[in-house]
Amino acid sequence: MFHGAKGPLLIERIGHLLSINYGEKEERKRWAMQGISYLQEVQCTSTPYLEILVEESGLRPVSLLNSQLVGKPHFSLLGGFDENIARDIISHNFQNAIFQMESEEVPLTKRYQHLEKITQISLLCKNFKGIEEIEYNVKNIIQGRKNFDMLNSMEKDRISHEVVQDDSFSLLRIQMLLCVSYFLQERYFDCCTKFFTMMTSEPLTLKVLSEHLDCMNFISKEEFIMMVNISVLISIPLDNYDDFIYLSDLKQFFQMTPLLVNCLELLINTNFNKFFKIWHGEINKICMESLFLEPSWSSSAAVIMRCKIYFFYLRISKKLQFSYLSSTLGIDLEDIKEELTKLIISGQLNFEIDGDVIHFEDSSILQSIVNEISRNGTMINEVIDKLKNENTDLKDIIQGNPLMYSGGNNTATIINNESSDDMDIDEVNDRSDISDSEGGLFEC
Amino acid sequence: MSDEDNNYDDFMLSDDEGMESIEMEEETDDEDKQNIEINEDNSQDDQDRGAARHKQHEQGTFEKHDRVEDICERIFEQGQALKEDERYKEARDLFLKIYYKEEFSSDESIERLMTWKFKSLIEILRLRALQLYFQKNGAQDLVLQILEDTATMSVFLQRIDFQIDGNIFELLSDTFEVLAPKWERVFLFDIEKVDRENMICKIDFQKNFMDQFQWILRKPGKDCKLQNLQRIIRKKIFIAVVWYQRLTMGNVFTPEISSQIEILVKDNECSSFEENNDLESVSMLLQYYILEYMNTARINNRRLFKKCIDFFEMLISKSLTFSQESGLMVILYTSKIVFILDSDSENDLSFALMRYYDRKEELKNMFLYILKHLEEMGKLRERDITSLFHKFILSGFIFTSMILEAISTDKINPFGFEQVKIALGSPIVNVLEDVYRCFAQLELRQLNASISLIPELSVVLSGIIQDIYYLAQTLKLWRKIARLYSCISISDIISMLQISDDNEMTRDDLLTILMRSIMKNRSVVYFKLDLTSDLVYFGDENKVMLPRCSKEEFRLMISPKDEETTEKARLIDFEYVNDVAIYNNPTRIRTKSSKEFFNTLRKSRETVKLPRVSNQSNEDTFLPSYMKFSNKYLELCKLASNNLE
C-alpha cells in the first residue's frame, strides 16, 4: 500500500488515503495508528494531517502528548533527509526545507543525489516553476556531461565507475520525476513524450525504471509505469493507437507493461465496454491508492478518457441516446448525462439534447450571428412594412386634394392635377423600389 | 498362431547362428595353421645358423607377443578397405575373424584383444547400416541378419561388462544413431500416403534392435557418456512405440504416450536446454504437437512448444546439411505456423505487437515454403489430395494470399504458383478456386457454402476463416453498400452482409465493423449513424464540423476569477481539447520511429487550424483568425437590434 515509503513520505501517503476517505474503517484506523506512531518517533506533530490522524485512530490527544519520546530519531526514519529538513517536510514547510537543502555544502560525488532530493520536495509541494528550473538545469548538466565525456576521456578514468553510474542513475531518476511533474500538472502528452524521449536517447532508462526506481522510496516502479500508461491512453488520439502500438523502438517498454498493450488492443478493436471495466476497476484502484496518481486521476484523467469515447460516438452519430451509451459502455447513466452535456456545452458542439436523445444540429460557425442577423432582418422588415403603410396613406391623402382645387380655375386646376399626379407617382415608385430591395435581401 | 510362428522363426534363426559359429571356428583354425606355416617358412629362409639361432629366439618371443595385435590390426584394416569398396560380405567375414579369435590368458593382451573384438563388431554394425541405407528390396532378410549381429554385440557387451578402455559408450551411441531407421521423409502428422507395411517393418526393427540393449538402462553409473547412451536407447524405443501406435491405432494421444512424450525433451533450469537435447528428440516432440493441433486445434504446452521451435531452428540454421533437409524444414515451418495459429486464441503479448498483415504475410510465406519443400520431397505428385496435412498447407496458402491480396494493389494469383498447379483438378483445389472467386466477388453466402465443403479444415484454420469472413463483410460494406446508399437501415445492411443462417450477424457486429473502419481510417465513404432509428447515412455530405468555437476559445470552466487562475484554466482547457481530440483531423501516422510519431502529434496538438470540412462553401477563405471577430459581429447585430427597437 505504501510502496516502501519511509520518512516524511509515509505521512504523506497515509494522509492522502485518509483525506480521500479511502479504505474500510479498520484499515483507516490501522493506517492512522501507524502514522501517529511514526510522528511520535520523529518527535514532530505539526503535520497538516494531525487532526485527521487523531480522529481516525481513536486516540485521545492526551495519550498522544504523554507518549513523547526523548532523544534523536533513528536515521532510517528520516527518509534520507536531515532531521530538521524531515520535520519541515512533515510540517509542509516545503520552502524552508528546500532552502536548507540548497544551502548545504554537498560533495561533488553526491550533488546529483542531492538534486534528486530537492526535486522530490519540489514535487511534494507542487512547486512546478521550481521544477521547470530543475529541468532546465538538468538539460545543461546532461549536455555538459556529454561534452565532458568526449573531451576528457583521460580525466574520466580517474573518476570511479561507481560514481559515474550513480550520477547517471540519479540524473535519470530526476528526469523521471520531471515526468511525474507533468502528470501532476495534468499535462499527459508532455509526460509520456518526455519519458519516451528519455527511453530512446538514454539506453539505461528501462534498467533504472526496472531496478533502481523503487529504491528511491519515493515513487514506485508500478506507479510510474501506470502514470505513463494513463498518459499514453489519454493523450494519443483513438485513431493513432494502431500506429503507436507498432513503434519498434518502444517494444521493450511494451514488454514491461502488458496492461497497456491489452488496453490499446481493446480500444483499437472498439471493445470500449471491456476497456472501461479495466479503467474503472484495476486502474482506478491503483490510482486511488497512490499519492501521486490520485490527484490527476480524480481531477481529470478518468473523465477525459470517457470524454474521448463520448466524442468518438458524437463523431459518428447523427442521433443517439444517453441510455444506449450507458449500456454499451457500462457507465452510469447519470454520469454520462452530466459529463456529455458538459462536453457539448463547453465545446459549443453542434448537438441538441432532447431528453434522452442527442441529435446533431447542422449549423455553421456563424450560426449564432446568423440567428441574430435573422432577428434583425425580421425587425427591419417590420419597420419597412410600417413605412410602406404610411406611404400608402400619404398617397391617398394627396390624391384627395385635387378634388378641392378642381372647383376653381379650370386651366390652373388641370395643370395642378397633372403636376400633383406626377409627383405622387415618382415618390411612390422610389419608395417602392427601396422597399422591394430590402425585402428581397432579408426574405431570401 | 502368429506368436507361435515367430517363436518357430526364432528357433530356426538360433540354429542357423549356431551353424555359422561352427563354420567360422573351422575357418579360424585353418587361418591359424596357415599363419604358423608362413612363419616357419620365414624362419627357414635365414641362412646364418648361429646368428640365426639367437635371432630366431629373440624374434620368436617378440613376434609371439605382438602377433595377435598385429594380425588383428591387419585384418581390421583389410576389412575397412573392403567396406569402403562396398564389398560388405567379405568385410564382415574378416571382422568376424577378429571377433572369433581365441582369447589368451594374459590379462593385458586379453583387454587389447577384447578392444579389437569390440571395434570389429562396431564395424560390422556400421557396414550393416550402409547396407540398409542402400537396400531397395528384400530388406526383410537383411533386417533379420542385422538383428543377429546386434544380438552378438549385446551378448559380447554383457560378457565384458564394458570393462575395456576407450570411448566405448560414445562408439555405441554413434553406432546406434547410425543404424536406427531414419524418419526425415515421413511425418507423424501426415501418414495417409505412407507405405504402412514398410514403415512397420522399420519400426519393428528399431524396437527389436533396441530391446536387445534394454539391459543397459538398468546399469548404474554417473558417467555422462553412459547416461547419454541410456537416453538414446530410451528415446529409440519410445519413438518406435509412438510410430507403431500411430500406424496401427491411428491415435497417439493415449495415457501411455502422453505421459511420456515430453520426457523426450529435457527441460530444466539446472542446465542449458541446448546441452540436453538432440535434433531427433525435439523433432519427434514437434511432430507430436503438430499432430495434436491437427486433431484438436490446441497446443496444451505452448511454453515447451516454443522452446522446441527455437532450439530446432537454431540447430538447423547452424548446419548447412540440416538446412538442406526438406523434411526438417517442413517440420520447422509447420511448427511455426501452428504456434501462430494457436496463439490467435491467446493473449500473447508478442503477437499483439506485430501488425496483423505482417503476421499474415509471414504465415503465407511459410505455407509457401512448405509447399516447395513438399514438392522437393516428391510428396505433391498425387492429383487427388487426400492428406489432411496437404489440404491444410494448401488451404492456408490460398487463404492467407486472399487476405493479403484484398488490401494490396498487387494482384498475384496464388493458383499460378507451380506448387499449386501440380494439384489442379484435385477436388480440394476446385473448392479453393470457388472460395477464391466468391471472395473476390464478395458473394458472402456462396463463400460460406464453398468453405463448408472442406469441414475438416474449419477447425485448424478457424482463425483465418473467421478473418476471411470479417474481411469480406467489411469489403462488401465499403465497396458496394456504402457507395450505393445515402441512407439505409442497419437491419438491411445486416441482411446483405449475412454469411449464413447458422452464423447470424448481430447489430453490434455491424456497429463494430463501422467503428473499427473509421478508427483505422479504412472507411472509404464517410458515414453517420442514427442510433435511435438504426439508420446509417453514407456520403461525404455527412462530414461536418462539430465544434462551433475555435480551439483557443474552448472553456471548461465558466467563471475565471483572476489573471493567474485564468491563465492556468486556459492551459488545462487546451490540454483537455487536445486529449479529447475535439479539433483533431483523424489521420494515420505511418512510422516506426517514436520520435517522428510524437513530433507529428505535437504539431497536430499545437495547431489551431480547423479541420477541413468539404461541404463548406467558404472553406478556403475562412480562417481561424476570423473567429476572433465573430463576437464583434454579434455585438454589432445586437446594437442594430437595440436601435431598431
Image (cartoon, rainbow, N blue to C red):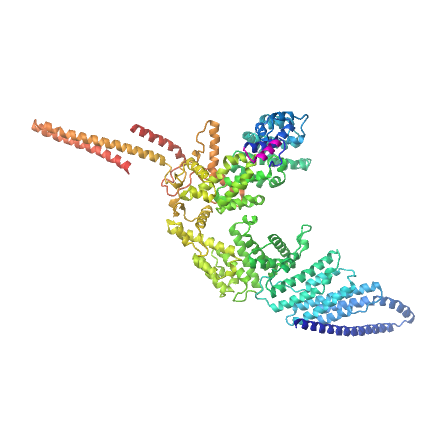
Of residues A159 and B543, which is closer to you in this image?
A: B543
Residue B627 horizontal/vertical position (percent): 39, 34
- The correct choice, above or below, for A126 with respect to B23 in the image is above
Choose top left, top right, bottom left or bottom right for residue B275. bottom right
Instruction: Check residue B386 for magenta coloring.
Output: no
Residue B351 horizontal/vertical position (percent): 55, 50
Residue B588 horizontal/vertical position (percent): 47, 45
Residue drawn at point x = 26 percent, y = 31 percent = A383
Location of the C terminus of chain B (image quadrant): top left
Choose top left, top right, bottom left or bottom right for residue A115. top right
Residue B286 seen in the figure: yes
Residue B104 horizontal/vertical position (percent): 83, 67
- The correct choice, above or below, for B470 with respect to B189 in the image is above
Location of the N terminus of chain B (image quadrant): bottom right
Tell me the magenta residue range. A20-34
Choose top left, top right, bottom left or bottom right for residue B623. top left
Total marks in image: 0
Residue drawn at point x = 79 percent, y = 74 percent = B26
Residue A99 seen in the figure: no
User: Relative to residue B162, is residue A152 drawn left or right?
Assistant: left
The overriding secondary structure of the stretch rendered in magenta is helix
Of residues B247 and A158, which is closer to you in this image?
A: B247
Of residues B106 and A29, which is closer to you in this image?
A: A29
